[in-house]
Image (spheres, rainbow, N blue to C red):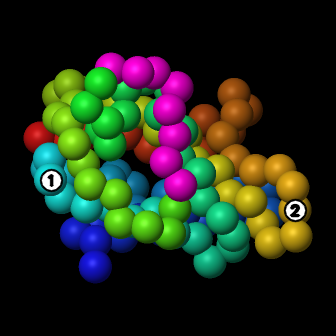
Amino acid sequence: MADHRIKIKFNGANTSLETTPLPAMNVKQTVNYFSDEGEVLILFPDISPFRTDNEKGTFVTGGEDLELKQATPLSGVPCRCFVRPPGQKQFKGWDVNTPLAGGNHVVK
């Protein structure tokens, strides 16, 4: 079981993190993103704490335990949350009009 289980809520028009702010996290801990409303995708527009490189614009999917592989700057790194409801083709979630459909990861 993951060290951190982070629930993504979807209200039909927007997504949000159930845990805000996100819990304190450390390298080598694991995270599992999940939603009762569908498939989860978490986009990291800057670096991802789940990678060891500095590639920007990467994503992870929900439903599996993911290891945190690198520390973030002290200010953290943003994420954007999306959910694809069952039977739909597109993910719904973060956009410029719904900036709260995301969070900030601080990993030490």
Judging from the image, what secondary structure is the residue with disc 1 in?
loop
The numbered mark, 2 or 1, whose residue comes first in the sequence reads: 1
Q: Which mark is on residue 28?
A: 1
Q: Nearer the viewer, residue 88 or 13?
A: 88
Q: Residue at x 34, y 52 (%)?
A: 21
Q: Nearer the viewer, residue 3 or 69?
A: 69
Q: Residue at x 60, y 66 (%)?
A: 9
> The N terminus lies in which quarter of the figure?
bottom left
> The C terminus lies in which quarter of the figure?
top left
| Residue type, numbered disc 2 | Gln
Q: Is residue 31 above or below residue 56?
A: below
Q: Can residue 23 be seen at all in this image of the molecule? A: no
How many numbered circles does the render carry?
A: 2
Asked if residue 3 lies left or right of residue 100, the reply is left
Q: Is residue 77 above or below residue 24?
A: above
Asked if residue 45 lies left or right of residue 106, the reply is right
- Quarter holding residue 48: top left
Q: How far is the residue under mark 2 from the one under mark 1?
A: 34 Å
Q: Magenta segment: does it hold 56?
A: yes
> Which span is picked out in magenta?
54-61
- Quarter holding residue 72: top left
Tag 2 residue: 88
Q: Is residue 78 above or below residue 87?
A: above
| Residue type, numbered disc 1 | Lys
Judging from the image, what secondary structure is the residue with disc 2 in?
loop
Q: Nearer the viewer, residue 21 or 74?
A: 74
Q: Position of residue 53 (x, y in %)?
A: 30, 24
Asked if residue 79 lies left or right of residue 71, the reply is right
Q: Badge 2, how many Cα within 10 Å: few under 14, some, many 20+?
A: few
